[in-house]
Image (cartoon, helix red, strand yellow):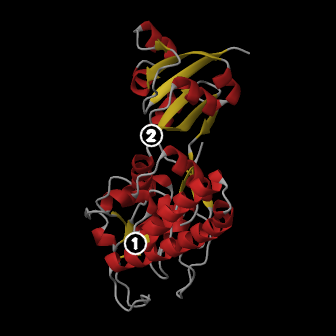
Amino acid sequence: MSFSIGIVGLPNVGKSTLFKALTKRQVDASNFPFCTIDPNVGNVAVPDDRLQKLTDVYQSKKVVSTIVEFAICQVVRKFSDPNVVHVAGAVNPSEDQQTINLELTFADLALIEKRRADVEAKARSGDAESAVQLKIFQKARAALDAGTLLSRITWTEDEGALLRPMQLLTMKPMLYVLNVDEGEATKETSGYLPISAKIEAELSEMPPEEAQEYLISMGLSSTGLDRLIVASYKLLGLITFFTAGPKEAHAWTLKNGATAPEAAGVVHSDFQKGFIRAEIARWQDIVELGGETGAKAKGKVRTEGKDYIMQDGDVAYFLASA
């Protein structure tokens, strides 16, 4: 399972530079206005020290990281550079944020209005299902007309089931990245995740050891990518669990609150269908005790059934019927 993060922004805020740094994929980074909400798409492996430690324990021949897909691409600017013009004439992150949200709102309004118009005639003719859908679309349109993001509205299960497949932009959780000057990358900013795209671009071109030394010299304990992943996981309600052995060490993404059978289904759909039980250990115990054999000897591996709720960092071994 991978997850998507939308990265959008006004022209010349550094979103292309950040995108290239995060995915090491070349996109247009010229100094001129271009579309705010057109997507850049790329994949990047999620760095996880726990996976590396499990790999070291088992001497795994293959390592598979969780993959993040960067899709719609939001970044607001705070960095200063006289050579990079701001489309509004001045650097103002909060105003940039409002402008972006307005563009996203207009995009959603167009989709909502199209669907509303499609069902309105049927609703007037007496079709009960269309009448229900019309009310939902009217509720969504009223919120957007009032400048309210759809993610801030409470939706019933039936309303969500109708709206979610539309992939409405303002219905998605929003993470605000503040592209700052190098010297401000360590400063906490309320409501924003501060990242210096310039630093990230430089790090992406360095060997791992050199990159780590550079991070330390800048007063940073982790890269912007690492912090973006943590913030995104928290925002989207995701956890990571692991399967590990001599053949492969694998990190898997899972919704927080998912059960052991659901986790088994992430590994392979047949595992969920035939789920019998799961053997679960904390990743720290597997590492400290040299694998599941040592962990079992110390009573650190437990058997869990269908009702077990997976925890971040679990190492799982699933037993399923054929």
Q: CA distance from mark 1 to mark 2?
A: 45 Å
Q: Residue at x 37, y 56 (%)?
A: 213
Q: Is residue 298 visible?
A: yes
> Closer to the camera, 161 or 120?
120
Residue labelled with disc 1: 146
The quarter of the image holding the N terminus is top right
Q: Residue at x 45, y 48 (%)?
A: 236
The quarter of the image holding the C terminus is top right
> Closer to the camera, 85 or 263?
263
- Residue 65, given in percent of the width and then of the height, sits at 57, 42
Query: What is the quadrant of residue 92 in the picture?
Result: bottom left
- Residue 303, given in percent of the width and then of the height, sits at 49, 12
Q: Residues within 10 Å of mark 2 (few under 14, many from 20)?
A: few
- Residue 205, given in percent of the width and then of the height, sits at 52, 64
Task: Locate residue 144 relative to residue 58 in the image: left or right.
Answer: left
Q: Mark 1 against mark 2, which lies toward the viewer?
A: 1
Contact, mark 1 vs mark 2 (Cβ under 8 Å): no
Q: Which mark is residue 49?
A: 2
Give the amino acid at mark 1. Answer: Ala
Q: Residue at x 44, y 7 (%)?
A: 297
> Closer to the camera, 170 or 229?
170
Q: Secondary structure at mark 2?
A: helix
- Residue 21, given in percent of the width and then of the height, sits at 52, 65
Task: Give above or below for 237 relative to 116.
Answer: above
Q: Is residue 78 visible?
A: no
Q: Secondary structure at mark 1?
A: loop
> Closer to the camera, 263 or 159?
159
Q: Residues within 10 Å of mark 1 (few under 14, many from 20)?
A: few
Give the amino acid at mark 2. Answer: Asp
